[in-house]
Image (cartoon, helix red, strand yellow):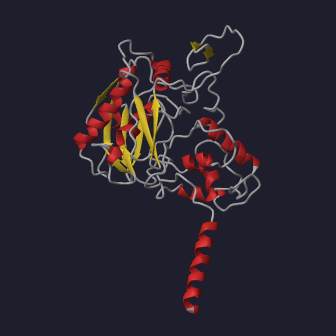
Amino acid sequence: MAAVLTVTFFFLLLMLAAASLPPRPPDFPFDSNPWSLFQNLTGCSPGDSNPVLPDLKNYLHRFGYLPPPPSNFSDVFDANLTGALLSYQRNLGLPVTGFLDPATLTLLSRPRCGVPDVVAENSTASRGRHLYSYFPGSPAWPADKRKLTYAITNASSVSIDRPTLQAVFARAFARWSAATTLNFTEVPPDSGNDADITIGFYSGDHGDGEPFDGVLGTLAHAFSPTDGRFHLDAAEDWVAAGDVTAAAEDNAVDLESVAVHEIGHLLGMGHTPAAEAVMYASIGTRTRKVELTSDDVEGIEGLYGGNPNYIAGSGGSTNQETSGGESLQYSSKSIRSFTAFANPTKIVGRCHNGFYYRTSKF
């Protein structure tokens, strides 16, 4: 009897100890992501030391928020890190706290585009009256080159047949062509350097100074006009056909969604804090986001002019994101950023429910 009581007491102690442990941070669906280690920063505050902080600082340096260190980044949550987090949160449309709150840690752990959000001193946080952004100097394809060619030059490392790849990229280019004065034509892969845009799947260090990091992490990157290089990480579980939201693989990534985003970079578009937009820097697994929103369209029209025959998705197209099992719906017709004025104003904007809203285009 005494032995039974002892065992029972032991298990009660184990249960109480487990109950006293801090809960696992919510909404970390990307356990195989190279950035999933950031979840270990839960509760880390300014002044604290943590062995994961150098990794976080390297991440923020990679995407434009911190300058390179004299030697190695420290493991201290210092003022520079706070400033970088403030800029990151502002650029990604998060609550601007400067802390490693759950929403920030979740987004830091999420797969994303490899193109930096901020380049040198030309910050995409300084957008003024709009949310979309361009590369520094607003590079674009020249006015006398409105018919661009592209070639899928390196696809042997993925198990997607060429006709399927061709269909995916054709649809992705067509979405931008519909909204602009640009036209895109595929040319044979042996066209090589003759194509304006080259598309390929690569692994690890592939010679452009932007190595890939395996499953999830950075999914792809593309260079600003008129470079024309568009690279995708061959290690991803790319879905090129069928419903990606029903994919069996936990790490499934929709190829067309990533292609539409990277083509935006090829044309000169930077990232936006509008989470529903195609040009948002991050995308979840098992997620499809291919419809250009008004933010995307206004941005590309600023570079190339608009297609007078362009008609956006009837009824307001929606892009859907899933994160940790939660479905998030964004409407392309939604008002994303506004300033309400209590007194009469001459500022040009749009009136809605008695208020003037400063929109992304005056």
Q: Which of 115 and 70 is in front in this view?
A: 115
Tell me where residue 311 sits by quadrant: top left
Q: Is residue 345 above or below residue 52?
A: above
Q: Residue at x 37, y 16 (%)?
A: 310
Residue 43 location, x and y as percent? 67, 56
Q: Quadrant of the image for the C terminus?
A: top right
Residue 258 visible somewhere in the drawing: yes
54 versus 180 height, above or below: below
Q: In this view, does 116 lie to the left or right of 201?
A: right
* Vertical side of 274 occupied by 235: above or below: below
> Residue at (54%, 54%) from the top-left corner?
35
Q: Residue at 35% across / 45% down in the picture?
A: 245
Seen in the picture, residue 65 relative to 74 is either above or below; the reply is above
At which x and y percent is residue 146? 38, 20
> In the rendered view of the protein, which quadrant contains the N terminus?
bottom right
Tell me the residue at 65%/28% (across/down).
126
**Residue 114 placed where, x, y %?**
50, 44
